[in-house]
Amino acid sequence: MTQERPLTEAIPLDGQALSLRGYEQVGGYQGLRKALREMSPQAVQEEVKKAGLRGRGGAGFPTGMKWSFVPMGDNAPRPKYVVANADEMEPGTFKDRYLMEGNPHQLIEGLILAAYATQADVAFIFIRGEYKLAQERLAKAIADAYAAGYLGKKILKSDFALEMILHVSAGRYMCGEETGLLNALEGKRANPRSKPPFPPVAGLWGKPTTVNNVETLANVPHIIAKGLTWYQSLSRSRDYGTKIYGASGKVKRPGLWELPMGTPMREILEEHAGGMRDGLRFRGVLPGGASTDFLVEEHLEVPMDFIEVQKAGSRLGTGTMIVLDDHTCPVGMTSNLIHFFAQESCGWCTPCWSGLNWAKQILAAMEEGRGEPGDLDKLAFQTKFLAPGNTFCALAPGAAEPLQSALKYFREDFERHILEQRCPWKS
Amino acid sequence: MLTVEEREEIEAELARYPTKEAVCIDAMKIVQRHRGWVSDESVRDIAELLEMSPADLDGVATFYNLIFRKPVGRHVAMLCNSVSCWIMGYEKMHKHLTDRLGIQFGETTPDNRFTLLPIVCLGACDHAPAMLVDNELHTDLGPERIDQVLEAYK
Ligand SMILES: Cc1cc2nc3c(=O)[nH]c(=O)nc-3n(C[C@H](O)[C@H](O)[C@H](O)COP(=O)(O)O)c2cc1C
Ligand code: SF4
Ligand code: FES
């Protein structure tokens, strides 16, 4: 049996975007038709909840549950908002760009369904400024959706109305953090907000707002159109559906593959990514983008889903893996990652900006042959301060993950840098 | 002063948002599209139009990477320095670019042709190393490929 790939199988292979007609021909907007014809907003929420869809933006929060926090009914504050988080700035992550460039209507339909399920009035697609091609294709697709009656007033002749706005951001990792994103949309610096209240209760301009990742939303039309039994059968695990996995680094065939949720890491890296380039050995992997803990050879059999990757000591994150080989310096890689997080820290909390800058300097010095004996303890100490609960948002704990796990799995490499007073990978 | 065209483009955005402030990043990007960068004078003009204080607007401007508060060259080249590109040879590409252009990050060539900047992950990690020139993506970079890309921007 060939495996179904609902999110990507209709994406044209010639690099073009799937048109509105093309999307309709493969069943596009049937989920929306069905919802408007025969389902209440609560029924849509319930279906997504039962399907077990979990957020693909990094944290894996159950989507239907998030929607159920939105106040409903005639007395709910208005207008209500939904936002597609298309900021995709997590280093090593390149799945949302592919989905938006290849099948923009799938995201639009998913966002309309999220709006219907939460009775929202306005939908934003918050996209990073660098994604020019995706912006052009989404702008056209939104215009086509308006013209075809999928957006605007009286959608498909029902009483449901929705405006959709493409918002192009101006670049900063913090804009992807849910509440930083809300501030960015309001024209402010993208500092995070204190929670509670959570956005589904009080978000954009104080009104209920639901933020979901692009890949999360792309799942929704299929769940509604084909039902949850079908949806759950796609997966090989207790986290349902398919997942878009990726691999970058020195594998033979870097790329993206939509596979059953729970596909083992080894299968993805060996069968799909073709294994390591000739002459190189696998040393480790960040399983879901820059802000996840390293896993190593002993973890290769781990099924890539939220539950199992967490058991192995890391997180599924975005599901796009960054592979470390034996000709690449693990200290240099960690230094690059921490440099990124230090630069993108918004400066609000001391453990984050001062801790990350300190760690950045220690790692850079180590790479330059100026490491000192106490450095590893200092770095380990910093990861404690960056841990969850000490900071305002998840950037700092996310930064701690690759650092703490690099110290654990590549300790000898760190020690060699200090002992030899040089980076052994630099000739 | 804002041109009539800039003003009209900003006003079109105002219609879509509930507050004037919400449009401020778009407004700066509109001005930047016309003039290449956002000067102190433009900050004051935009702030006045949107009923914000220039200091608040400047605070927003400096937060975002894609708003340029200093003049840039005719073309802006941005080299990805994030982790997948780093693994795939970022440092060599960086050296090649800076040698070739004779400038460091943050600088502009004397003939005003290129400004060179670092940028975070461009979502092209399976085709690393990657760079943007004037917001167009170029991937699978090597020294020769970089030379070809630069040639295309006069
Ligand atoms: C610093 C930071 C950056 C983030 N960037 C993104 C992003 O670019 N895209 C995204 O979907 N989620 C991002 N997230 C996660 C969001 O906060 C949020 O959890 C997500 O958009 C929710 O969508 P989901 O439930 O559909 O996954 C980021 C989180 C943090 C802490
Ligand atoms: S953890 Fe870092 S990025 Fe998040 S609010 Fe604090 S300082 Fe800002
Ligand atoms: S790390 Fe350079 S494009 Fe992703």
Image (cartoon, rainbow, N blue to C red):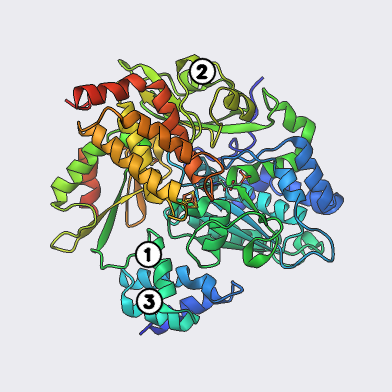
What residue did someone put label 2 on?
A: A299
Q: For label 3, count other residues whose C-alpha is less than 10 Å away and answer few (under 14), some (14-19) or many (20+).
A: many
Q: Is residue B15 above or below residue A413?
A: below
State whether residue A71 appears in this view. Answer: yes
Q: Does A183 appear above or below A258?
A: below
Amino acid type at circle 3 is Val
Q: Few, some or many C-alpha atoms within 10 Å of disc 2 (few <14, some 14-19, many ≥20)?
A: some
Q: Which mark is residue B43?
A: 3
SS at circle 2 = helix
Query: Which residue corresponds to the image point at 37% horizontal and 76% vertical from the top-left?
Result: B43
Q: Quadrant of the N terminus of chain A?
A: top right
Which callout, 3 or 1, points to the residue nearer the camera?
1
Task: Using the image, name the chain to which the residue with label 1 belongs.
Answer: B
- Are labels 3 and 1 assigned to the same chain? yes
Looking at the rendered structure, the secondary structure element under dot 1 is: helix
Q: Residue at x 19, y 27 (%)?
A: A422
**In the rendering, at what x and y percent does residue A396 appear?**
47, 44
Asked if badges 3 and 2 are on one and the same chain, I answer: no
